[in-house]
Image (cartoon, rainbow, N blue to C red):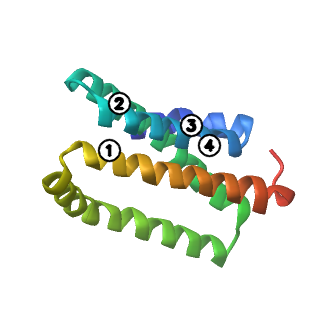
Amino acid sequence: MLGIGQLVAGPVSDAVGRRGPLLAGCVIFVAGSVLAALSPGIGTLIAARLLQGAGGSLVVVVANSSVRDLSSGEGTTKLYALMMGVVGIAPILAPTIGGYLDVAFGWRSVFWLLTGLGAVLIVGVLALLWVILAPYIAD
């Protein structure tokens, strides 16, 4: 879903701007995480994971596009390197953290952690795009 969503998210964020799709992606991801944590069966869990992928695809596309929009030259290279570092480390740490959470609190705790991280991301997006960068960005 993440890859397919990126095909749709790119043109959408180009057409309507970056802020709305970024916030929408975060909210969709959090909704999918809550739904996954509360899922009564595999069908609901699969639907929830699809929602997470759809939200994540919006966030990934907007993050990449925003780097190109807001920087140039060496600054762009540094931002992409930082992003790729996070993308590279996440798959290494996630299974370990998820395993510990599963043993200690059950499998649903992984989705509650993702819900919390998504909520923190929403607050960060609101602070960054609507307060700090608002004077410099035009949708």
- The three-letter amino acid code for the residue at tag 1 is Phe
Quarter of the rendering occupied by the N terminus: top left
Neighbour class for label 4 at 10 Å: few (<14), some, many (≥20)? many
Residue sitting at x 69%, y 57%: 127
In the picture of the structure, the residue carrying the numbered disc 1 is 111
Q: Are marks 4 and 3 in contact (CB under 8 Å)?
A: no
In the picture of the structure, the residue carrying the numbered disc 3 is 9
Q: Please report whichever mark, 4 or 2, sits nearer to the chain's N-terminal start.
A: 4
Q: Are marks 4 and 2 in contact (CB under 8 Å)?
A: no
Q: Please report whichever mark, 1 or 4, sits nearer to the chain's N-terminal start.
A: 4
Q: Are marks 1 and 4 in contact (CB under 8 Å)?
A: no
Q: Position of residue 128 (x, y in %)?
A: 69, 59
Q: Is residue 72 left or right of residue 110?
A: right
User: Between tags 3 and 2, which lies in front?
Assistant: 2
In the picture of the structure, the residue carrying the numbered disc 4 is 23
Q: In the rendering, which numbered label is found on residue 48? A: 2
User: Between tags 1 and 4, which lies in front?
Assistant: 1
Residue sitting at x 67%, y 52%: 126
Q: Position of residue 87 (x, y in %)?
A: 40, 62
Q: Are marks 1 and 3 in contact (CB under 8 Å)?
A: no
- The three-letter amino acid code for the residue at tag 2 is Ala
User: Camera-side residue: 25 or 113?
Assistant: 113
Residue sitting at x 49%, y 72%: 81
Q: Are marks 2 and 1 in contact (CB under 8 Å)?
A: yes
Q: Secondary structure at mark 4?
A: helix
